[in-house]
Amino acid sequence: MKMGMGYTVLSRLRTLARYTIAYACITHCTFEYVGDFVLCKGPSMEPTLFSDNVLLTERLSKYWRKYQSGDIIIAVSPVNASQYICKRIVAVSGEKITTLKPHPIEAESASKQPSEISMVTDYVPHGCVWIEGDNKSNSSDSRYYGPIPLGLIRSRVVCRIWPLSELTGL
Amino acid sequence: MAFRRFCKSLLYGLPLGITFLDCVGYVARVDGTSMQPALNPVAEERDYVFLLRWGIHNSAVERGDIISLISPKDPAQKIIKRVVGMQGDVVSTLGYKHEIVRVPDGHCWVEGDHTGHSLDSNTFGPVAMGLMSARAVAIVWPPERWRLLKNELPRRRRPVQVAKASYYS
């Protein structure tokens, strides 16, 4: 009788493990290929987004639609690979932007004199986008590290779902 | 009935397979001669390498590792290169616009082993570490080429100055 009990427990555990793995995999695939939820931190996108807002993002539309200027996107930070950033695309490749040249991050790494840095009009290179926060005075973005490659973009923000009173498409 | 069973196993098997490929790793063919002699030593024969995705985002990458990354020029293309410098290192370049470059935070310096026949950091500059997708650990095909890929950096390509590890940990 005891052995029978042990067997039922074992088979239940196996069923449980099977379901857990199956649902973990389905969740992974949904978040990785369809879209996910993102909690915003920091002031760089004010007044559009505030700290502690929860956003719904999607990563399906990149297969049939190109990123356009005006889209709000989630990307891996180019200066810290373990951090995500939420910014607005200001210009896509081929469009014009006015920028400091060389970019402050490059100037730092090449130890250039400040006098060699100047404001110029430039085109966004192929395969890159120019991103900026909506809060221009308090945002570290392409104005600091230059255009970012499209490969860093994770997803596009669709709407804000929290707080519920501010449920809006973006 | 058999069809329903097939559908059900597909419904479970497909996410399982995709998750495995995403989290653990997969096998990919290497095209081009930019990594000679480590990969594709004979131009007509293609090597297949196992790309390990496990731990790629926990800064488990070291100088000398062969990594695959999304091309900074074209997001649809993946390239395979060797890491020469990590963030904070000072590297001497081969034909880049500056002779000496300090690799910015969050970036790394990648080069193909086949100097001069490789489109790498000497052309497009330091690349963001977020573009890394996997680390190549072994050649799995053809059988006579089977081997583990060693972490090796030619002496002349070592960074001029290596960043303090404690600073970025």
Image (tube, rainbow, N blue to C red):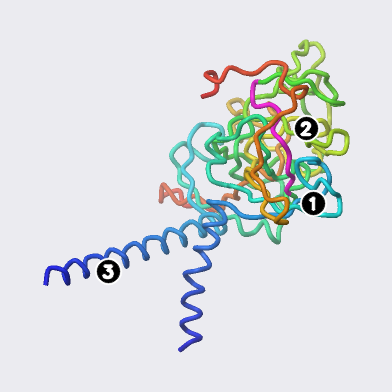
> Label 2 marks which chain's residue?
B
Residue shown at the point (74%, 23%) measured from the top left:
B155
Q: Are marks 2 and 1 on the same chain?
A: yes
The residue that label 2 is drawn on is: B121
Amino acid, disc 2: Ser
- Judged from this view, the residue extending furthest toward the left is A1
Residue assigned mark 1: B31
- Label ID, residue A11: 3
Work out whether residue B106 or residue A149 is closer to the camera in this orientation and state it.
B106
Quadrant of the rendered image containing residue B91: top right
Foreground residue among B26 and A158? B26
Q: Secondary structure at mark 3?
A: helix
Q: Kindly indicate the quadrant of the structure image that contains residue A91.
A: top right
Question: Which mark's residue is nearer the viewer, 3 or 2?
Answer: 3
The residue located at (73%, 39%) in the rendering is B81
3D distance between C-alphas at marks 2 and 1: 18 Å
| Mark 2 surroundings: few (<14), some (14-19) or many (≥20) residues within 10 A | many
Badge 1: few (under 14), some or many (20 or more) residues near its Cα, within 10 Å? some
In the image, residue B153 lies at what x, y percent? Answer: 71, 29
- Residue lying furthest bottom in this view? B1
Q: Chain of mark 3?
A: A
Q: Nearer the viewer, mark 2 or mark 1?
A: 1
Residues B86 and B138: in front is B138
Q: Secondary structure at mark 2?
A: helix
Residue at the (86%, 54%) spot, across then down: B44
**Left or right: where does residue B163 sit relative to residue B43?**
left
Where is residue B160? Give x, y as percent.
72, 16
Disc 3/disc 2 C-alpha distance (Å): 54 Å
Q: In this view, which residue lies farthest toward the front?
A: B144
Magenta part of the chain: B78-88
Q: Amino acid at mark 1?
A: Asp
Residue B41: where, in percent of width, then height? 81, 45
